[in-house]
Amino acid sequence: MNAKNIARTLSAVLIFQLGIGALLVFGDMKNGSLGLPSFAPDAPRLSEPIRPGDQRRQFTPSRDRPTTRPARDAGPLPDRLTLTREDGQWRLEGQIEDGDADRLIPQLDAADPAITELILQSPGGAVRDALALGRHLRSANITTRVLAGEICYSACPYLLAGGPTRDIAEDASIGVHQHSFDANTLLPAFIAIDSIQRGQSELMAYLIEMGIDTRVMIPAMATPAEEIYILLPEELRDYKFVTEDS
């Protein structure tokens, strides 16, 4: 291959990478996550009831709520994951942000009375912090629960998976979708894709470690970040989110 053909080939590769990179950046700006944008028809609002085969809904935590009715009206969730004790029960609620694992693990360990069961409610957030917190809950033997009418979306189900015993109310709302694993930055396409692949590998290893059926990643990876796939009660049992002891 002569120099002119080499230059053309390199130019074609560069244009291809720039095109993919532009799509990644566009998806990043649109969805707040590093991934390809979705061109599928808009899903119904989260307030619309789900039924088997019709489980993808729009996902805007600040705007949409599922049709389930919470057992208590505590107002909006905290902007950041917060540990509280209410009516004799420990609760971990709010958006999962970078650094929350390092911030909250000492609080979990220092809690008085000691935490044996933790109620979760979160729209999701930072995946790696959810995994770190989930591993800590498992090592501390802390049961996880989601109450009727409350939500656990996006990265929250991976935190939920950390409980050695997991109790999910029939009328709770548990949802999964695609994730990003690094801060939003302008990355070359091959670096971005490598980051996504490594992140998915870490997530799969975590699910296996926690005894969760990795088939749950099929609807998760097929659902774009601006939507959420609501798991049916039978799926929660099939994917082993619900434990036999709960």
Image: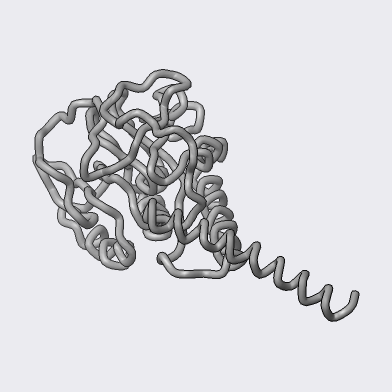
| Picture quadrant where residue 244 is located | top left
Front residue of 214/50: it is 50
Q: Is residue 91 left or right of residue 180?
A: left
Q: Residue drawn 84% across and 81% down? A: 3
Q: Is residue 59 above or below residue 102?
A: above
Q: Is residue 27 visible?
A: yes
Front residue of 105/235: it is 235
Front residue of 83/46: it is 46
| Picture quadrant where residue 101 is located | bottom left
Q: Is residue 14 above or below residue 244?
A: below
Q: Is residue 245 left or right of residue 189?
A: left
The residue furthest top is 51
Q: Is residue 163 visible?
A: no
Q: Residue drawn 56% across and 49% down? A: 204
Q: Residue drawn 41% across and 31% down? A: 56
Q: Position of residue 39 (x, y in %)?
A: 49, 41
Q: Residue drawn 44% across and 42% down? A: 177
Q: Is residue 30 above or below residue 105?
A: above
